[in-house]
Amino acid sequence: MSHKQRIKGCIQWGALFALMIGCSGGAFAEEPPLSVPKAAQLGNADGAIDFNGWLLYPAVGVFSVLTNNLYQSPVNPLSVAGIGMAPSLVAEWTNGIHHTTLYGNADLRDYSDTSANTYDGQAGFVQKYEAMRDLIFTVQGDYTHKTNTSVLLNSIPGAIGTPAPGGTIVTTNGQQTVNVSGPIVANPYNMFTALASVFKILNQAFVRLTGSVSRTEYDNQTPLYPDFTVKTFNGSGGFWLNPLFYVYSDGSLANTTYSASSPILGGSNSPVSAYRAVAGVGSAQIGLFGGALYFGHQGSDGSTSAVGGSTTTGGNVFGGRLSYYPTRYWTWSLSADETINIASQPSVSNLALNIATQSPLLVPLGESTRTTAVNLQSDYIVSQQLAVTTRFGYTRVEYLDMARLDEAWLAYAALKYQLWRNVMLSLDYQYSKIVSTAALQSSTRNYATAGAVYKF
């Protein structure tokens, strides 16, 4: 059996396993529902503008930025101060069976070095159809424009961030996103994404199947950043074994195709397929604790070898999460992940290895590596007006075919204060440091923002 056939068989098994026992996107579980949820309702009309059956949630944010290394660059770090504005609008309509969400937002930043100015934006729609209370079909269309792009792109794209009423950015499975940037470069691009999914509840269990296709077009194509298309499939689910424990599974497959010949990436199209499949067990809150453990496999095929031909990579992944709830308003979460990636031969790619925890360190897909990542996060609701989030992370990447070691540290703190019913103040600080034994790879960044959001 060829490696491609093994990859195809593995992801088909993973998707089937997901259908049988299930998980959410990423490595950790989405708890299966204990009962069929009520029919979808509109958001709280309090604070919304009611217009002909639609609820409108307009908001505008203003903020300031200060950083000593805007791009997390190892050489010539750019220190800038800046101000920005972020208007947004979410509109909702439902008749109980059909639920329509329209959204749009912009992020405009003016820095002391005008060459670093950014003009980002996003617009799209989400259409849900509840054929039955336990069977939901969803389609989504999204357009995103970004001024900066990551030095390496995830080999398996993450879920689309969708603005929800109130301004919180969430993924398609309802989890809040947290931005932890790695090294980036200025190269504007437009991304067009179409997504379809089906969600089925099966007696204290669930199954979710999602397929998407996205097209990314750069303003300035380069040998490392040609336009490309990604087709992604994910199958996930989970069910309760008893009132305390549930099992889950998740399988993802992505195929990236480049539309232009790239001498660095290996000729015309040079497609790359990547997959990641995990299964695990999780628990409900037992006393003051809860958690999850998982094990699986990941790999890729098609990265261009530096000596000619294609490269296959792969290895086991495993990890877990432990949550601690000292009070109903305070949560601690410790997560750890180890991802092994063995390459048949060294290769050059603009894709990064997917790991389950967030880190400022990017891991090249075409190298043999062992990546260990640990994150500790605290979420504390101090009062009805004040909430505090802190995060500490450590990532270690061992290059198995060379004498290279990369390490990264991350510290993050965010304060949110509800000044009035429709005014939210925020203060964020992020410290990230990358130390590498390879030349011109180490960097340090301090990044602080202060802002306010006004909801009309």
Image (cartoon, rainbow, N blue to C red):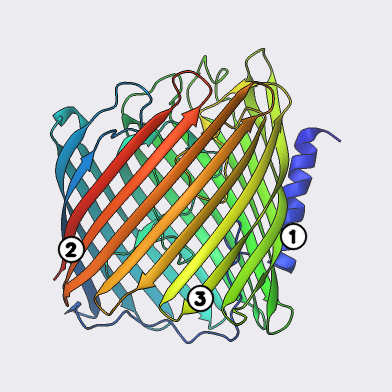
Q: Read off the residue under disc 3.
A: 325
Between 322 and 196, the one nearer to me in the picture: 322
Task: Name the secondary structure under disc 2.
Answer: strand
Instruction: Indicate which disc, 3 or 2, sits on the residue closer to the N terminus.
Output: 3
Residue occupying the point 56% across, 79% down: 288
Label 1 with label 2: CB-CB less than 8 Å: no
Image quadrant where one finds the C terminus: bottom left
- Circle nearer the N terminus (1, 2): 1
Residue 432: mark in rendering = none
Give the residue type at disc 1.
Answer: Leu
Label 3 vs 1, first from the N-terminus: 1
Q: Nearer the viewer, mark 1 or mark 2?
A: 2
Which residue is the extreme one toward the front? 326
- Taking the spot 65% from the left edge, 82% from the top edge, the residue there is 204
Whether residue 440 is visible: yes
Task: Point out which mark residue 16 bears.
Answer: 1
Residue 376 lies, in percent from the top left, at: 50, 57
Q: Residue at x 33, y 37 (%)?
A: 445
Distance between the alpha carbons at the discs numbered 3 and 2 = 29 Å
Name the residue located 41 percent from the left edge and 63 percent from the top edge: 176
Which residue in the protein does label 2 denote?
A: 453
Q: Secondary structure at mark 3?
A: strand
Residue 262: x %, y % from top left = 50, 18
